[in-house]
Amino acid sequence: MAGRGQLLLADMATVVLATGYGGPEMLTVKEEPAPAPGPGEVKIAVRAAGVNPVDYKSYSGRFNSDPAALPIRLGSEAAGTVTHVGDDAGMIGVGDDVIAYRITGGYATELVAPVSALVPKPESLGWPEAAGLMLTGVTAWHCLAATGVHAGDTVLINGGAGGVGLMATQLATDRGATVIATASPGRHELLRELGARPVTYGPGLAARVTAAAPDGVTAALDLIGTDEAVDVSLELVADRARIATIAAFSRAGQAGIKALGGGPGAEPGTEIRTAARPELARLAAHGRLRVIVAATFPLIEAADAHRAIMTGHTSGKIALIP
Ligand SMILES: NC(=O)c1ccc[n+]([C@@H]2O[C@H](COP(=O)([O-])OP(=O)(O)OC[C@H]3O[C@@H](n4cnc5c(N)ncnc54)[C@H](OP(=O)(O)O)[C@@H]3O)[C@@H](O)[C@H]2O)c1
């Protein structure tokens, strides 16, 4: 056992940290000793880490600017191979390919994660796809559950071409709902391929949605946070309990719509999101849910990955490859 401990202590990991509050220039690549897994934990050789808007927001200063919280470890989802197991790791063994979510510090070559955060990686998924399945997937799942989307519904998905939007579009069509998804024209073909009726966002949106859904819209998701998305949803959906936002938290209370996730006054949906993980893996394994990867970047170029996602116009997931 001493040999095992010494081996782990000698391991070094490359990690990406935010060392200050601000833009992507605050990201630093560092070599540090890789920690050993404790009880109920495993160590994973990361093959890909998912990038999400919350990652750059976490060090932007928007939520927090407390110097005591620095440096900030980034990355709440990753996929990789288990290399070491701690005590009480259950059925997980060395060599298992896993998806880890929700974790801290996924932007790394080595990661220690609790077994409770792991789901077996479907063999059919590539590493970038596996790393990008969960955060957007559980968010989309929560949105559909909170608004009760079912077969026969017509759902307006504002921001249909984003990471969450592409998941929500597929999950809603898989349930038998008709999806009207907003996106810029360059994304329409992809949305059609996924079974949605695409409409271009911008002035006149309500009329375009009505033309695409002449029998009316029964539920709406705001996955982008613009006033336009909230206003059009309020105009077209009669039952406000069937409108949810994951971004327009300041408007949700007054508008009487559901705010979901980690924002102020929002419903975290922890149980729904946790239960969704194996379901998402199953749907992906059966080819009923695709993870659309917009781009991959080397781990050490995480700052460029953040510059890309900060444009707000990437279509699908960005992954970092160690
Ligand atoms: N509350 C939660 O639990 C939770 C969880 C995940 C994400 N979020 C938040 O939800 C938002 C979306 O996340 P994401 O990962 O999907 O982001 P993302 O992948 O970066 O979204 C980019 C997409 O937004 C679309 N878009 C940009 N402006 C738009 C507009 N005015 N109307 C409609 N679509 C527009 C773009 O489409 P075009 O390229 O066609 O313009 C692009 O495809 C972020 O603010 C994120 O922080 C919240």
Image (cartoon, rainbow, N blue to C red):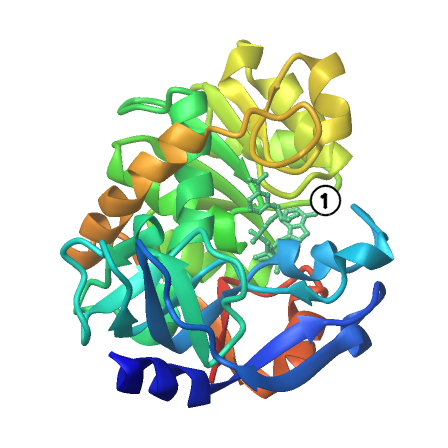
Q: Tell which of 86 and 133 is nearer to you.
A: 86
Q: Position of residue 19 (x, y in %)?
A: 77, 71
Instruction: Name the residue: 73% across, 34% down.
Output: 228
For the N terminus, the quadrant is bottom left
Regarding residue 298, the answer to whether it shows in the image is no
Q: Mark 1 sits on what residue?
A: 202
Amino acid at the residue labelled 1: Gly
Q: Position of residue 139 (x, y in %)?
A: 47, 41
Q: Is mark 1 within 8 Å of ligand 1?
A: yes
Q: Is residue 80 left or right of residue 15?
A: left
Q: Is residue 143 left or right of residue 159?
A: left
Q: Is residue 91 left or right of residue 320?
A: left
Q: Position of residue 42 (x, y in %)?
A: 32, 65
Q: Indicate the secondary structure of the residue bearing disc 1.
A: loop
Q: Is residue 201 left or right of residue 196?
A: right
Instruction: Name the residue: 75% across, 40% down.
Output: 203
Q: Is residue 265 above or below residue 202?
A: above
Quadrant in the rendering for residue 52 = bottom right
Q: Position of residue 3 (x, y in %)?
A: 28, 87
Instruction: Name the residue: 30% across, 54% down.
Output: 40
Q: Is residue 136 above or below residue 156?
A: below
Q: Tell which of 85 and 119 is nearer to you.
A: 85
Q: Tell which of 17 and 4 is nearer to you.
A: 4
| Numbered disc total | 1
Regarding residue 165, the answer to whether it shows in the image is yes
